[in-house]
Image (spheres, rainbow, N blue to C red):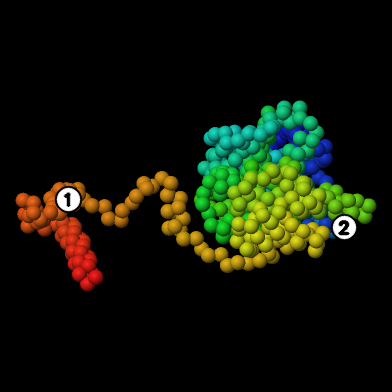
Amino acid sequence: MKKSGGLQADHSKTSFFNDGNQLFTQLTQQNLQFQDQGSFQMKYTNRVTQINIQLAENYLKITEEVLKFENIQQKSYKYILIENACLRVVMNSETQQLGIRLSKNGQQAEFYGTNLELVEKLKKYVIQSEFQKKYHIIEKIGSGYISSVYKVRHLLSGQKFAAKIVEKSTLTRSSTLEKDCFLNEINILRQIRHNNLLKLEEIYEGEKNIYIITELLEGGPIEHQILNNHYMEQEKIKVMHTLISSLHSLHQNNIYHNDIRYENILLKDSQDLQTPCLINFGKAMQIPSKRSNVTSSNHLDQEKIINLCIKRDIYSLCTLMLTIFTKKVYNLNQVVDELLMKNFQYLTRIEFMGLCPQLQRFFEMIFTDRQNNKMEILTCEQILEFDIFRIPQKPRNSKMFIAQQLLPILPRRMSKFIPTQENKDKADQSANSIKLPPLNRGDSTSVEKSFSSSPKSVRLLSSHLNKKTKKSKSILRKQLLNKML
């Protein structure tokens, strides 16, 4: 069991995430809605005080009753920007009470109370330690330029997650741009909240590595699932609506992905097309950033950049959806660049003439000058109002879906009634007993001798007699005509 926080080494000064700021700071964001988290004891600079903690996004508000002159009590307020603060669970050696320690750049404070659920609310913003004591690595599932991704299991809950592991030495040797992309991705993951956007769980830092824990997406790339299976247009339209809705959620938070491609769209469940997730926010931008102050001088420049980012995201996503509907593979970067230069003749109407009328109109509005001449920019919110998303969607026939999925592995011929071995033997015996009557009645073998009571032989015999009767009647007609002539 952990002892008092003072007996544990504080690594906040040597942390990769140390930005040089102290633990207590000034409140820079306005209109924050703080929620009460309960009463705690705060131990700071060897002084223990009773405080109240409130939480709003990535800020802690600490309220303390201070005794002033003439026994008048006044409230004092402190603020902690918990983003990238180091957190450890500690125990008070005197009261044996559990608590947490927050530290930044060597400055630390300990908080003891009964509401340990506060840790769950903070873990997305803070940097924790001792990854190996909380997670077990199962297998490697991917790799990138500066990182590797592993499937891991939480030791207490047994739940599986994805862990993106980055070597700190690699980050140290990397360029400033790569470091900024790494920190930018973490900053954006902390802000997004949508079922179809990658969910960040928590972050750990060890002596050699940094561990980013996210939800596990086991459905694989959406490209493989859709292009390798047969889905109706209505189902693909639902996928398109889901992805545009998730992109709309990003844009509402002034976040622009800037790297939408098939590799960055994964499914949570391979059997559920309603679970696609946008991942990889290393190249994403937030304009304006929460940390920047917008002035009138740079407002126009930011507006131009925002319009460009919105167009790039929409053109990229809709080009991928066009591939899903038409099964044609396009050079994504080239298509998007041409559209950004307003070359609306690059993708002609021939590309989507084979689709249903509603889809044709949809892609005409995106890729041609039909809609682009009416307004400077087309947003996700406007696209979600298109007629294609108002068509009532029929529920999928699950039996048909299962049959389509199983069709490649089933035998080519299937019978509803499979005969038993006894019936097979009887059928073979009856087939062997059939003897066709001779065509010439003058032969020594008569029809009566060769006749079998089998139904098949009766049908064959009747067919043979009908043919003979028709032939004899035609001969008589010819003879009568010859006599008359």
**Residue 303 point in image, percent of width and height:** 85, 54
Pick whichever, 194 or 52, lies toward us: 194
Q: What residue type is labelled 2?
A: Glu
Say which quadrant the N terminus sits in. Answer: top right
Residue 252 x, y percent position in the rendering: 74, 57
Q: Which mark, residue 70? A: 2
Q: Relative to 377, is 140 on the left or the right?
A: left
Image quarter of residue 111: top right
- Residue at the disc numbered 1: 431
Left or right for 296, reference 154: right
The residue located at (69%, 56%) in the rendering is: 349
Can you tell which of label 2 and label 1 is closer to the viewer? 1
Q: Nearer the viewer, residue 400 or 254?
A: 400
Hey, which quadrant is residue 203 in on the image?
top right
- N-terminal-most mark, 2 or 1: 2
Secondary structure beneath label 1: helix
Quadrant location, the C terminus:
bottom left
Name, please, the residue furthest toward the right: 297
